[in-house]
Image: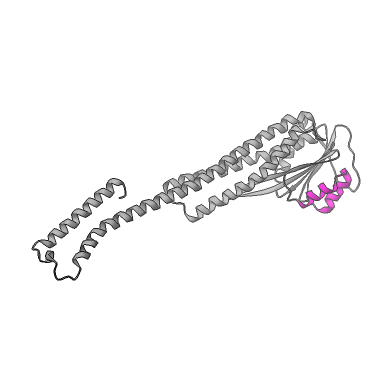
């Protein structure tokens, strides 16, 4: 059974459980029905369609899942899709909550993440004066809970990237660390594609005249919209940090390679002196006066040593050694 909870509320207080039936269901003033399902079957959604007059297109979207965040208006009903997100290692795992909102009913369909439904319901039931505001208040609570889960996730990723940033200043990044930061960068880019539509959904709930959403709820949705913008700002900064880590790693690598190349060039220049002198005196000419000099060997060694010492001093002074 995929029904998480199905209750009728009167003045914000749970009255009784509601069974899924194949005929319309009615409510009195001050009452509304809140049903939560997880990955429901087609038969269960067909029953809900008959009970509450749900639009077939919205039912199809809720059954399939894998929707982008959006808000659709079908007569006097709303269909809202929001994306949940949480970290699994360095990967962002996504879930989905499809919400049908009517004047006297709210149906939440969870795909991939239903862990907060019971907890959230119990939390609202402890404040019946707030729950008495009706389905639009529950909708706000669901959207707010989903968006509030974004910031801790992004901050955790930011801490991990900053750790990598500290590491590159002390030593080389190994291949696995380089692959890791590129994986996280791809995850952040994908998450930005979710944040944009989420911001549009909350913006519409804040600024547009929509059925089933009371004008008094707009400030609440406006607060959620501020949270989305804050997450967008943090994600933008996180992406910049990732780019700077990649660039800094590349620059430091080039600097280290340049330092090694300068050292090798310096030693090659120093070693070229004895090699050149030895090459000259190793030629097979019979008329080479220096070969018969009494102290020629000592003089040549002294000249080689002096030239090598001068080159070493110059390279040390210029910072190459």
Tell me if I can see residue 240 in this picture: yes
Q: Is residue 313 left or right of residue 165?
A: left
Residues rendered magenta in the picture: 41-64
Label the magenta part by its dominant secondary structure: helix
Tell me if I can see residue 140 in this picture: no
Which residue is most to the left?
294
In this rendered view, identify the residue nearer to me: 124 or 310: 310
Which residue is most to the front?
287
Q: Position of residue 40 (x, y in %)?
A: 79, 51
Q: Residue at x 59, y 41 (%)?
A: 236
Give residue 208's quadrant in the image: top right
In this rendered view, identify the residue nearer to me: 242 or 255: 255
Q: Position of residue 219 (x, y in %)?
A: 72, 29
Q: Residue at x 65, y 35 (%)?
A: 227
Q: Position of residue 15 (x, y in %)?
A: 83, 37
Total number of numbered discs in the rendering: 0
Asked whether 33 falls inside the magenta stretch, the response is no
Q: Position of residue 103 (x, y in %)?
A: 84, 36
In this rendered view, identify the residue nearer to me: 7 or 50: 50
Asked whether 62 falls inside the magenta stretch, the response is yes
By what rule are the colours in the image chosen? one colour
Which residue is most to the right?
23
Q: Is residue 92 left or right of residue 12?
A: left
């Amino acid at each position: 059974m995929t029904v998480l909870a199905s209750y009728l509320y009167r003045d914000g207080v749970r009255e009784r459980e509601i069974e899924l039936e194949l005929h319309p269901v009615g409510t009195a003033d001050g009452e509304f029905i809140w049903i939560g399902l997880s990955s429901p079957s087609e038969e269960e959604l067909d029953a809900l369609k008959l009970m509450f007059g749900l639009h077939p297109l919205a039912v199809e979207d809720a059954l399939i899942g894998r929707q982008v965040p959006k808000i659709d208006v079908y007569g006097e009903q709303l269909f809202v899709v929001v994306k949940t997100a949480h970290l699994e290692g360095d990967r962002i795992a996504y879930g989905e909550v499809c919400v049908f909102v009517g004047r006297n009913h709210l149906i939440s369909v969870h795909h991939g993440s239903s862990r907060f439904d019971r907890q959230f319901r119990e939390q609202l039931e402890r404040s019946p004066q707030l729950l008495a505001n009706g389905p639009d208040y529950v909708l706000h609570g669901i959207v707010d809970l989903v968006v509030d889960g974004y910031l801790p996730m992004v901050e955790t990723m930011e801490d991990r990237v900053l750790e990598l940033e500290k590491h590159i200043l002390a030593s080389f990044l190994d291949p696995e660390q380089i692959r890791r930061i590129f994986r996280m960068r791809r995850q952040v880019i994908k998450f930005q594609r979710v944040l944009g539509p989420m911001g549009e959904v909350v913006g519409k709930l804040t600024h547009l005249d929509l059925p089933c959403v009371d004008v008094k709820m707009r400030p609440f949705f406006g607060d959620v919209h501020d949270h989305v913008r804050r997450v967008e700002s943090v994600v933008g900064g996180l992406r910049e940090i990732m780019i700077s880590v990649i660039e800094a790693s590349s620059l430091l690598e080039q600097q280290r390679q340049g330092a090694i190349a300068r050292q090798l060039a310096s030693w090659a220049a120093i070693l070229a002196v004895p090699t050149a002198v030895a090459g000259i005196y190793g030629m097979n000419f019979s008329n080479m006066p220096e070969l018969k000099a009494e102290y020629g060997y000592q003089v040549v060694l002294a000249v080689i040593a002096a030239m090598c010492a001068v080159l070493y001093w110059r390279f040390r002074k210029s910072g190459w050694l």
